[in-house]
Image (tube, coloured by chain):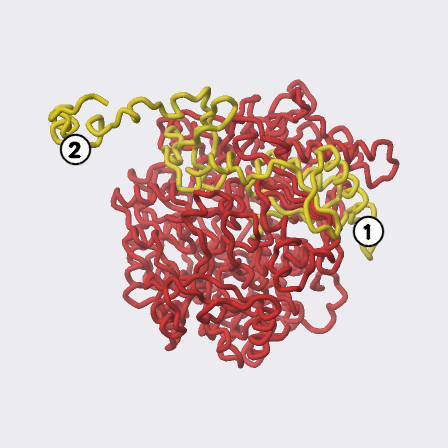
Amino acid sequence: MANADCIILMGGNMAEAHPVGFQWVTEAKARGARVIHIDPRFTRTSAVADRHIAIRAGSDVVLLGGLVNHVLTHDLYFREYVVAYTNAATLLGEDFRDTEDLGGLFSGFDPRTGDYDPSTWAYAHPDGRVESTGGEEHGASASARAAGDQHGSGGPALEHSTVLRDDTLQNPRTVFQVLRRHFSRYTPEMVRDMCGITLEEFEYLARSVTENSGRERTTCFGYATGWTQHTLGVQFIRTAAILQLLLGNVGRPGGGIMALRGHASIQGSTDIPTLFNLLPGYLPMPSAGLHDTLADYLEEVASPTQKGFWAYADTYTISLLKAWFGDAATADNDWAYDYLPRLNGPHGTYQTAMDMLADKVEGYFVLGQNPAVGSANGRQQRMAMSHLKWLVVRDLNLIESATWWKDGPEIASGELRTEDIGTEVFFLPAATHVEKAGSFTQTQRLLQWRHQAVEPPGQAESELDFFHELGRRIRERLAGSTDERDRPLLDLTWDYPLDEHGKPDPEAVLSEINGYHVTGPDAGRNLSSYTEMKADGSTACGCWIYTGVYAEGHNLAARRVPNGGAGIAQTEWGWAWPADRRILYNRASADPQGRPWSERKKYVWWDEQAGRWTGSDVPDFPVDRAPDARPDPDLGGAEALAGDDPFIMQSDGKGWLFAPTGLVDGPLPAHYEPQESPVRNALYPQQQAPARVLFPREDNLGAPSADEPGADVYPYVFTTYRLTEHHTAGGMSRWSPVLAELQPEMFCEVSPQLAAERGLETGGWATIVSPRSAIEARVLVTDRMRPLRINGREVHQVGLPYHWGVGTDAVVSGDAANDLLGVALDPNTQIQESKVASCDVVAGRRPHGEALLRLVRDYQLRAGATVGTDSARITDPARETVEPDPGDDEQGSVWHTRW
Amino acid sequence: MAAWSPLEWPVLRQFRSGDVFGRGPAVTSPTTRHIAPRTATADRVVQSVCPFCAVGCGQKIYVKDEKVVQIEGDPDSPISRGRLCPKGASSAQLVNNPLRQTAIRYRAPYATDWQDLDRDTAIDMIADRFLETRRRTWQDRDEHGRPLRRTMGIASLGGATLDNEENYLIKKLFTAAGAIQIENQARI
C-alpha cells in the first residue's frame, strides 16, 4: 500500500479498525498518493483522506460498475496488459445470455430452486463442440458446499486450457465486448440515483483512479467486511477485481485489492480451515455424490490438462492423507480417502444453529468466538444453544455464549427459564497469546511465530494442549475397537513429541503442516517447496500452500531480521505463503516481453542473460520460462504456462474479467438490492440477488422492501461496524477495564435530519427496531451521517457498533446490534448480509420482559411481515426471462434440492 | 528536598540545563529520576504478535518473575514499526486481568449456577459425551447408499483467534471423528 499512487478504501474504516496498518496509507499519502474513502459514514479514515464520498450501504456494485463502464467507454484501460494477461480476448460460447438479454438474470437460472446451472457461461470450445452440461457442477451443489471459498489460493478448474481468442477484442463474443455491453447501464447518472454520489464526486473518483493507473502508476483498493457481508459480497469484490485488471493494477507494487481482515489468524484459519467446506490448502471437503471416490475427487478438483499449479492437486491431496493417516494410507486403499466424512449440503454455522433448534445437534464447541453476540440474529443463536445437550466454551473470559442460560436476553424476556434449560455447559479457561507458542497468519498471508513468554495461569491451557489431550483420551477409549468407523481416529497420526509436562511441541505440528519426505533417501527431511510433493505416498504434508515455512527444519515464521532486511519486499521477517512470495502473480509486474512496465514500478523481470526471472521478490512464475515461450497448452500443469500467463493458479493462466466457472451467482457482477432495502432496484426488474441463500422462518422474518406494503414500517437503513477500542463481539475487550472505559456504552450514530425527524438527542436513548428484535442505544447525533438522495427520495442511514452484548460478567454490557439482523447469505461463501438491513428508530429506551416481544411483534404485524416477505426468487416474472426454460423434469436429482 | 534556590525557578532551570522547552531533565521530578521502567528491569523479553486484528503488529513481551509486566510494540517489525493501537497496547491487561477466568466452570443440566471441576474430570466428561453423541448420531450412508461416514451431532465454532497449529489439530481430530460442522469467524 505504501507504494500506491492512489488508494481507494471502501467497505471498511481502516484508520479505526486497522489503525497500525493505516500508517502505510498515511505514508503513501505523504509521498503524494491520493487517498479516497468511500463509506456510508464519515470516519477517522475519511478525516485524513483527500476526500470522503458517502455511499448508500449495499450499492457498491453500482459505483464500481460505473467505474468499469467509465474505463471501457473512454478507452482508459491498459490495453497491452488487458490483451496479454486477462481473458478479455477469450471467446464465450454461443449459449451465454447476459442480464441485458434476460431482464436481470443470467442464463441457467432455475427459479424453483434459486440456483444457477453455469454450463452456458463456459468459454467457446476450440473444436466448436458445445460443453456438455454434465461437465459443470450445478450451482446448488457448489453453493451448498460454499465452493467459492475453495478459490482462496487460485482459480477454479477448467477442463482444458485451449481457448479461442480474438486479440483485436472486436468479436462480439469476446469477454471484452460482453463486458462492455453488460456494464453499459452503469452510468454516472445511475451511480447518482442509486448510490447517492454526485456526478462531480464520481468524476473525481474516476479521474483519480484512471490517472493513477498504467505503466508508471498504480492504484490499490482496500476493503473489509463492508464488502463481504452482503448477499452478493463476492460480486462486490469481483467488480473491483475487474476494474483493477482493466487498469493493470494486479501483480504490481502499489496495486491489488487488499482484504483487511479482522482477527489475528483469520487468514490462517481459512488456509488451515476450521471451516466445514474445506480441507487444508483450499482443497474441498468431499461431497457425497460428487466425490464418492478419490478418482472422482481428483477429477473434479482439477483437470491434469488445465494450466498452472492446481493441476497437481493429486500430490497435495495424497500428501495430506499421508500426513493424517500415516502408514494406514496406502495405494491399495486409495490413501485412506474413505476415512474422510462427506458433505451433502451446506453445513455452515447458520445452518448448524438451525439444526440445533431442530434438536439435530447435541454437542457444540465454542473456541474463542462469541456467537451469542457476534452472529447475525443473536436470539436465534442463543435459542439454538438452549437446545444442546452439552456445550464446551473455551475462552479467556466468561463470555455471553457461556452465560446465556443464566443472564441472557431470553431469560430477561421470559422466553427461557434457567431451571428449564437442560444444556450442560463446560467453561474451560484458555491461554492468551503470550502463554503459548505458535504462528498466526496475518491478512497479507504472512506467518509470524510467537514465542511463549510465560505459562498459562491456573487451569488455563492452549487449544493445542486441550485438543491434543482430548484426542488422546478419545483414542484411548476406542483402543481395540473393531468398528470400522473408528479406524480414522485410531489410525490418525497423533504421536507428537511431548515436553516434560506431556504437552505437544507446536513446532512439530508446524513441521507436519509444512510436510516431509516419508520414504526414500530423504525420509524424515522437511519439504522445501510444494513442487517436491508426489502422489505416490512418498511425501506427507498437512497444508500444501504452507510448504517451505519449515524448510530444512528451520522455522521461517520465526525469522525476525529487523525491518525485514534491506530489500523493498522486506522478506526476512516471517514467511508468506505461497513459497515466501510477497506479491502474488508478480510476473504481471513486467510487460509481455519480460521488461518492467516502468522504472518506477520495477519489481520482477526477465534477466535475458541469465535466462531467469529475477527482481525484488520470489518470482511467482516458473523461474526459467522465457517470456516468449509458447508451450503446447495440452501439456497441462505448469509446463503448459506460456511466458505471458502470469496468473499461474488460473486454469488458463489469465486474470478473469469474466468468470466462466467458479461462481454460483453469475459470471459477472450485477447490482441487486440488499435482502431488505427501502429502494427499488433501478438497474433491473430483479430486486434482490436471485441466488441468495434464504431462511424463511418465523424467527427470521424480513422487512418488506422498496414500495411493498409495510416497507414504511422499517423506513431506515442501518449498518454495523467496529470501534478502535473494542474487538468484534467483545470477548477480548469488554472485560478490559482500560478499553471498557474508553468505549463504555452502546450507541447509534444518526444524522441531524433523522434526529429531528424522530426527536432524538445526543446522550439520550433510542430504540432501534427490526423484524428480529429491538435494542436500545445512546444517541450520537452527528453530521458524519448524512441522508442521501436516492431515486429522488431521501434515505437515512443509522450506524451501529456491534461490540456489546447482554450479560453480567463483562465490565461493560449493552444491547447487541447483531440481534437486529436477519440471516440471508451470499451463495458463494455462505456469509451473512450484516452490513445493511432495514429498521425503525424511535426516541427512548426499549421495553423489557414480555413487553419487548410484544413491541417486535406489533411491528411485524403492522408491516405484514411473513415468512414470504422478501422470499421471491424472481421479482417480476413478466419482465424477466428464464433461459433455458428449466422444464418440469429435474425434480428428482439430489443436486436440485434445497437443503 | 534541597533548600529552595532562585536558580530552581523553572524558567532558569530550563535554560541552565539546556532543556529550553521544559520537556526533559528540567522538569523531571526526583521521584521520576529514581524509578526505572519495567522494560529495563525485566528478566527477559520475548517477541510475539498482537492477538487482536489481522494486521499482525509485532509485540515485545517483558517478563519478570514469570509474570508479564509490560507489552510494547516491536520497533523491528516491518509491519508495525513499533506501534500498537489501543487494543494492542492494552494486551498486558488481557493477560493479567483480574476478571479473567483461570478455573474450569461446570453448569449441570437445569442448574442455576456454576460449580468447580478439575481438568481431568472435565476432559473425561467431554470425551465421553463426544463419543456418546458420535455413536448416537452416526450416519454411515445417504439414501442412495453413498458413503457419508459422519456425525451431524457435534459442531464447533472458532479458530480465527487461534494459532495455525491449533486449527490444524482441531480440523484433523474432528475430521477423523466424522464431525463436519466445523466453522469459524471467517464465515462471518
Colour in which chain A is drawn: red
Work out which residue is located at the far top of the displayed protein and give it.
A521
**Left or right: residue A436 compared with residue A500:** left
Q: Quadrant of the N terminus of chain B?
A: top left
Which label belongs to residue B141?
A: 1
Residue A897 in the image: x percent, y percent?
Answer: 71, 64
Which image quadrant is residue A562 in? top left
Q: Is residue A411 visible?
A: yes
| Residue B21 image label | 2
Kind of residue sitting beneath label 2: Phe
Drawn side of residue A402 relative to residue A657, left or right: right
**Closer to us: mark 2 or mark 1?**
2
| Residue A291 image offset from top left, x and y in percent | 72, 48
**Residue occupying the point 77% across, 66% down:** A892
In the rendered image, what is the letter of the chain coloured yellow? B
Q: Amino acid at mark 1?
A: Arg
Residue at position x 29%, y 63% in the image: A203
Label 2: which secondary element? loop
Chain name for mark 1: B
